[in-house]
Amino acid sequence: MLADSFETIIQRRRSNRRFDPAIAVADEVIERSLKRAILSPNSSNMQLWEFYWIQSPEEKAKFHALCLGQSAAKNTAHLVVFVTRQDLWSQRAKWNLSRIQESLQGKEPGKMEKRGLQYYSKLMPLLYRQDPFGLFTGIRKAMCFFMGIRKPFMRFGGKADQRVTVHKSCALAAQTFMLSIAAEGYESCPMEGFDAVRVKKELGLPSGAEINMIVSVGKGTDEGIWGERFRLPYENVVFKR
Ligand SMILES: Cc1cc2nc3c(=O)[nH]c(=O)nc-3n(C[C@H](O)[C@H](O)[C@H](O)COP(=O)(O)O)c2cc1C
């Protein structure tokens, strides 16, 4: 049963913070897992993400320090830095446009294709465009306010909304990656304990990029599991309406 396999993977994935340095993780495991991560759902298929695979012993040592020396970043077989690239919105919108245009193969666009072309040529610029004076943000916020008076309207105005959007999608990719690592028989730990300024500098990233999380991978140990897995009771967090 597919659901049984999925349950096994979910139960198997734990944040492990002590890896066995003697056991390597083959590159193919990471490659397969990154390919699966790329298939994650993401906002408007804009794919405003990048994945930096840290492999070399020198870089891994640097990243251990950048992750504040925490044990989850020590003795890792690999590290993957999940990065958001909100700044690449125009490039990615054009990429999506070109994919639709290619699929037409010279034919006239149908209803679906027309909608797609409009979506990436008109709506994406409207949602993502920024200017130094915050003019577009002002226009978006005013639009959301007035259009939302009488009927439901997507509230997507300011820079923070855009950041939330790209981080949501990137975190989903990180989750797919970690589940894949569990399915491959290894352990991982997601981390937000790092110096984002220095990580960006180390990776040579521009100001528009942001670090979503860093995931360490290795063969975990029993000592790497910090106790029982407890969660709030189902009734406390699930509300039927
Ligand atoms: C966004 C995010 C950031 C995290 N940052 C860290 C971290 O910096 N260091 C760490 O040891 N664990 C970190 N964790 C792991 C959590 O502590 C862990 O997922 C949680 O305690 C639940 O345990 P489980 O993953 O074993 O189910 C992070 C998890 C998430 C989702």
Image (cartoon, rainbow, N blue to C red):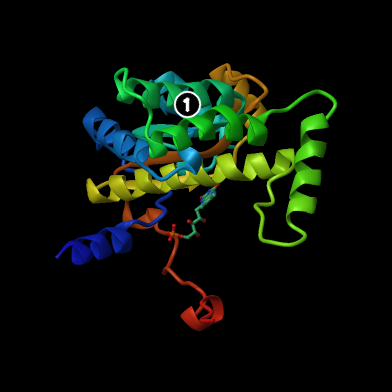
Q: Is residue 52 left or right of residue 196?
A: left
Q: Amino acid at mark 1?
A: Ala
Pick the front one: 36 or 202: 36
Query: Image point 54% across, 20% down: which residue?
Result: 203
The residue at which mark 1 appears reads as 61
Q: Is residue 184 left or right of residue 113?
A: left
Q: Is residue 65 left or right of residue 141?
A: left
User: Residue 186: percent from the left, percent from the top?
Assistant: 27, 46
Numbered disc total = 1
Circle 1: is it few (<14), some (14-19), or many (20+) Cα within 10 Å? some
User: Residue 63: percent from the left, percent from the top?
Assistant: 51, 29
Residue 180 in view in this figure? yes
Query: Image point 81% across, 23% down: which residue?
Result: 132
* SS assignment at label 1: helix
User: Residue 217: percent from the left, percent from the top?
Assistant: 36, 40
140 is higher (above) or lower (below) than 9: above
Residue 71 in view in this figure? no
User: Residue 90: percent from the left, percent from the top?
Assistant: 57, 23
